[in-house]
Amino acid sequence: MRLTEQVHQHLQYTLKAGDVAVDATAGNGHDTLFLSQCVGKAGHIFAFDVQLQALEAASLKLQESNAPAATTWLHSGHEHMLQRIPKSLHGKIKAITFNLGYLPHTDKSMTTKPETTLTALKAATCILADGGTLSILAYTGHDGGREEAEAVKLWCKTLNNHFDVRIHIPDNTRSSPPEWICMVKEGASNGL
Ligand SMILES: C[S@@+](CC[C@H](N)C(=O)[O-])C[C@H]1O[C@@H](n2cnc3c(N)ncnc32)[C@H](O)[C@@H]1O
């Protein structure tokens, strides 16, 4: 099974109808649509991207696919997550997904970067619900991708034991396979 399918399988297991989820890197909206289908019409999705063209493409994709959940599109860096997600929902977000890197066929300088990614991940651990999943798919083949994946894994080691962290690296012949860092928040914790 491909890594992206494994991510979706895990999210499908985690999310229930009516849940709230965050797509931290909307891109073309594949993950946003999947999250929407998992939480259904009683649920809500917040989707971040720094590129307007990504948000427009993602929004169109969800419209064309009759995505069930209401979606709040945020033209903003995910590093502002703590301020952009309503306070009343902090501690109630059941899944937050990051798909790091750049949007294929667009400006490669608009890639995610370690410093802002780590700021966003720290915020994500604070707003995640107990039992919620923080999923990070890190691509390592492009400039800076390996460094970003290593920075995320190093940061995971600094977390307290309220997080169950699993790192999945496909056992294949590609020299720079994508890596999936899957974190489940286990209990009462402020995440830092
Ligand atoms: C690999 S793509 C995401 C693919 C997406 N999940 C999909 O289904 O198509 C990474 C996205 O992250 C966005 N991005 C880069 N830096 C960001 C930041 N600081 N905050 C939010 N999004 C960012 C890029 O614009 C790009 O669209």
Image (cartoon, rainbow, N blue to C red):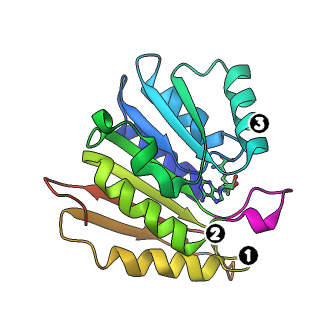
Tell me if mark 1 has few (under 14), some (14-19) or many (20+) residues whose alpha carbon lies within 10 angstroms of its own.
few
The Cα atoms of the two marked residues, 3 and 2, are separated by 21 Å
Viewer-nearest of discs 3 and 2: 3
Q: Name the residue under label 1.
A: 142
- Residue 1 seen from this side: no
The Cα atoms of the two marked residues, 1 and 2, are separated by 7 Å
Where, quadrant-wise, is the N terminus in this rendering? bottom right
Viewer-nearest of discs 1 and 3: 3
Tell me if mark 3 has few (under 14), some (14-19) or many (20+) residues whose alpha carbon lies within 10 angstroms of its own.
some
Q: Are marks 3 and 2 in contact (CB under 8 Å)?
A: no
For marks 3 and 2 on the same chain, the one whose residue lies earlier in the sequence: 3
Q: Are marks 1 and 2 in contact (CB under 8 Å)?
A: yes
Residue sitting at 45 percent across and 50 percent down? Answer: 81
Q: Are marks 1 and 3 in contact (CB under 8 Å)?
A: no
**Residue 12 falls in which quadrant of the image?**
top left
Q: Is mark 1 on a helix, strand or loop?
A: loop
Q: Is mark 3 on a helix, strand or loop?
A: helix
Magenta residue span: 101-111
Considering only vertical position in the picture, is 125 above or below 89? Answer: below
- Residue 20 seen from this side: yes
Considering only vertical position in the picture, is 174 above or below 134? Answer: below
Tell me if mark 2 has few (under 14), some (14-19) or many (20+) residues whose alpha carbon lies within 10 angstroms of its own.
many
